[in-house]
Amino acid sequence: MSEPQADNDAIPSTPALPSSEAEWRSRLSPEAYRVLRERATDAPFSGRYTHPGAPGRYRCAGCGAELFDAASQYDSGSGWPSFTAPVDPEHVELREDTSHRMVRVEVACARCGGHLGHLFPDGPGPAGERWCINSTSLELDPGSADFVD
Ligand code: FE
């Protein structure tokens, strides 16, 4: 895992990042630690954000960085929250993932390095992207929705 970018000015200020894995372990629930820090995957259809719901901004469950707007969420039928785009490409980091005998694009939080999910090229939007993200990696902030009149 690459080093987190703790001083990324592009991301609004959020609580200080843990400086060790032990500190991450004490801050996160065991489930969140497994997904964010050990790259585990939520069982399909098990997560609280599987289907689109309330408006707001999804923040990183590890560090609070804004990652996805609920307005970009759609129901992919995959069993995981799916988005057409992140709120800002600088808020996410893409890495090649060759685990499980597949070549996939892993999506991580650019601020804390936490594992979020994967990016697939079969989405419905203009860019054809499906950002397939674990519910456990997200925390919906209903107060930071974009309101359009
Ligand atoms: Fe994060």
Image: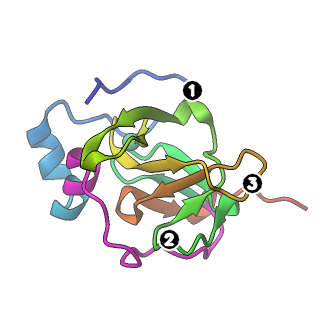
Task: Identify the main secondary structure in magenta.
Answer: loop
Location of residue 23 by image quarter: top left
For marks 2 and 3 on the same chain, the one whose residue lies earlier in the sequence: 2
What is the C-alpha distance between the residues marked 2 and 1?
A: 31 Å
Expressed as whole percent of the image width and height from the top left, the position of residue 8 reads: 47, 23
The residue that mark 2 highlights is: 78
Q: Which residue type carries mark 1?
A: Ala
In the picture as drawn, the residue positioned furthest to the front comes out as 101
In this picture, is 126 found above or below 12? below
User: Is residue 45 found inside the magenta-colored segment of the image?
Assistant: yes
Q: Residues within 10 Å of mark 1 (few under 14, many from 20)?
A: few
In this picture, residue 50 sits left or right of residue 30: right
In this picture, is 56 found above or below 120? below
Q: Which residue type carries mark 2?
A: Ser
Indicate which label's residue lies in the foreground, 3 or 1. 3
Circle 1 sits in a helix, a strand or a loop, which is it?
loop
For marks 3 and 1 on the same chain, the one whose residue lies earlier in the sequence: 1
What is the C-alpha distance between the residues marked 3 and 1?
A: 25 Å
The residue that mark 3 highlights is: 125
Q: Which residues are magenta?
A: 34-56
User: Is residue 74 found inside the magenta-colored segment of the image?
Assistant: no
What is the C-alpha distance between the residues marked 2 and 3?
A: 16 Å
The residue that mark 1 highlights is: 10
Front-most of residues 114 and 17: 114
Circle 3 sits in a helix, a strand or a loop, which is it?
loop
**Res. 43 mark:** none
Expressed as whole percent of the image width and height from the top left, the position of residue 119 reads: 51, 47
Q: Are marks 2 and 1 in contact (CB under 8 Å)?
A: no
